[in-house]
Amino acid sequence: MFSISAKGVYGVSAVLELALGYDKGAMQIREIAEAQNIPRHYLEQILVVLKRGGIVKSFRGASGGYSLAEEPSEIRLLDVITLLEGPLTVAASGNRGDTRLNELWKDLAEGARKRLDRSFADLIDEIFLAEKRLNFSI
């Protein structure tokens, strides 16, 4: 119903990488790009937007790079997506189609917002839990 562009996907991936390495300090663009398989030039553009939005901060110099502006528990997935993609909407909502379905479209958008309104710390916990379940063997 709604889509997230490459910009949003790469932006979330970059913030996830910074969240995973939060305690290690700043990461260089090259490191983030390689770890998340993001084209470096595109990542540079995304990081500028994330910096303007207060999600990341940058450091100059030989040991410079990017880090999160706050702890992973304080940065919401929905905030990153909204910053990069704009407000979350369902394309079918509005004055198109059968207006009796408008509540359905609103509910879909609200459900997506609720699912995305979690911190990167929560997301990391979910990823590790899923990986643990996949690696379980008898």
Image: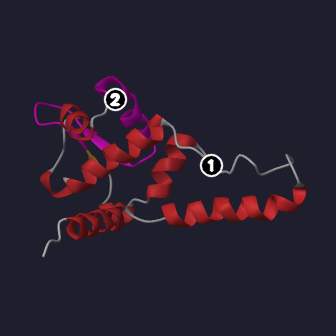
- Which mark is on residue 22? none
Of the pair 127 and 45, the residue shown nearer to us: 127
Q: Quadrant of the C terminus?
A: bottom left
**Residue 105 is at least partly visible in this image:** yes
Q: Amino acid at mark 2?
A: Glu
Q: Residue at x 61, y 65 (%)?
A: 111
Q: Is residue 103 left or right of residue 80?
A: right
Of the pair 29 and 4, the residue shown nearer to us: 4
Q: Percent x, y for residue 68?
A: 30, 51
Residue occupied by mark 2: 44
Q: Residue at x 43, y 60 (%)?
A: 76
Q: How many residues crowd mark 2 within 10 Å: few (<14), some (14–19), many (20+)?
A: some
- Which mark is on residue 87? 1
Q: Percent x, y for residue 77?
A: 44, 57
Q: Are marks 2 and 1 in contact (CB under 8 Å)?
A: no
Of the pair 119 and 55, the residue shown nearer to us: 119
Q: Is residue 42 left or right of residue 125?
A: right
Q: Residue at x 39, y 49 (%)?
A: 55
Q: Percent x, y for residue 25?
A: 16, 50
Q: Of marks 2 and 1, which one's residue comes earlier in the chain? A: 2
Q: Is residue 60 magenta?
A: yes
Question: In whole angstroms, how far apart are the C-alphas of marks 2 and 1?
Answer: 23 Å
Q: Percent x, y for residue 106?
A: 73, 61
